Image: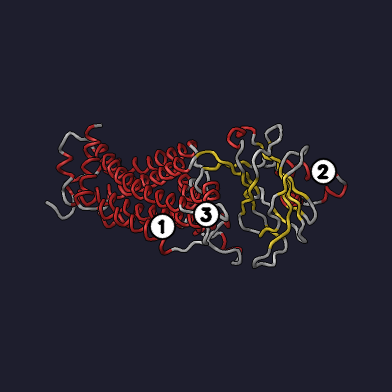
Amino acid sequence: MRPLLSIAWLTVKAALRYRVFAVMAVLLLLAVVGLPLVIKDDGTARGFAQIMMTYTLGTITVLLGFATLWIACGSLAREIEECQLQMVDVKPVARWQVWLGKWLGIVALNAALLALAGGTVYAMVLSRANRLPTEPVNQRAALFNEVLVARASAKEKVPDVEAELERAVSEVRKRPEGETLNVDQLRTQLHDQVLAAHQVVPPNHLRRWIIDLSDARAAVRDRPLALRVRFFAAQNPGGAATFATIWEVGPLNQARVRLKETRLPAQAFLELLVPPNLLDEQGRLVIDCANRSETALLFPLEDGLEVLYRESGFALNFARGLLIILFWLALLAALGLAAGSGLSFPVAAFVALTALVVVLASGTMASVVEQGGLITPGEEEAMKHSWVDLVAVPAFKAVLRLINVVRDFSPIDSLSSGRSITWTQLARAFAQIVLLAGGLFAAIGITIFHRRELARAPGRS
């Protein structure tokens, strides 16, 4: 470990000597302090906190990400071109130790810069929150209950739609007229009906959710809950249209609590406050929504309704979010070092930045994979399966598998919405981002660096 740590310390010293650390620290602090002054929020405490964390943490990630790629590419490529690594190569230090030492040094720099910028964001948010008024509306309490908190979520058990579909198809096929029906068309038609039975609430009908919170009884005792709701309207006039609903919560054998919110907008995510201690004897929360509007409402199975409850404090949740961002930066450091192991600095920087652009364009690749090719459905059928599609679709699938390993985690969204980042999620992020994806680039970079002849660097004798 001693040679490895020595290389890491030399990498840190080089960044300090060339004032990279100082310049990045100034840029990050300017972004953290300046963005809240430029970006306007909706005037609420919740809006300010969400805007501040989303934009400041996003800007911090982008600045550190590009700086990490630049430093990582130059750390090996430039030192090889300038014959500096040749002096290290003759010492009793293995090349894998040189590679990993530089990676550790870059990660250490990112950790220090991220702690500085993240600590500043945390202090600014808390400072602003503690100055909020408590009258006539206690905005401070609302902020600490909805945003500056780590909230876990619970949902209704997802029904087995496929099993219900197969039973419905089997029942129709048993009828005399069912034997002549096309099975694929029948399955498609019945699939929509099965989904509608679970999702659609017609006018003057009731939808009931039963959320099992028995494992979280201690966490929710004497604490208010929140219902995160989203629905779609069959007939939506647009604009600021709202739809009449009646929400009742509580055990069925007791007097139930009717929530204040009645007219709600469609499509947007809404949070309805639920008073504490409304679980039944089995630890379940029973929620009823009566549709009193003139059109059907659709509550998606995935995110139509979920219950949010406090799991831990904001400080620990914020620290876990910063750690996931650090994992992303560690992956970018491995990518930059892998590119710099076998390429010149300009080419390595171009390759690393191109890879980053590919990640940002993953939405386009997902659309291509979903539609089965680059040609839109309106083109001729013969053009849909051209040789370009035969090559592009499998390649995009492979790239998306690797990208999804990293993009499964969204700490900025979780922090800005008061969602809990659990220790399990943190461990999965470390395993998938650092060990799996980062280890892949590390293996490629160390292999290339081990086989490279350093004395053949261009422009040197």
Is residue 356 visible in the rendered structure shown here?
yes
* Residue type indicated by callout 2: Glu
Is residue 390 visible in the rendered structure shown here?
no
What residue is disc 2 on? 171
Residue contact at pointers 1 and 2, CB within 8 angstroms: no
What residue is disc 3 on? 46
**Camera-nearest residue between 131 and 18:** 131
For disc 2, the neighbor class at 10 Å (few under 14, some 14 to 19, many from 20) is few
Q: How many numbered discs, if any? A: 3
Q: Nearer the viewer, mark 2 or mark 3?
A: 3
What residue is disc 1 on? 357
The residue sitting at 23% across, 49% down in the picture is 15
Give x and y (percent) for residue 260.
Answer: 69, 52
Q: Quadrant of residue 222?
A: top right
Horizontal relation, residue 404 to residue 25: left or right: right
Give the SS element for disc 1: helix
- Pick out the residue farthest to the left: 461
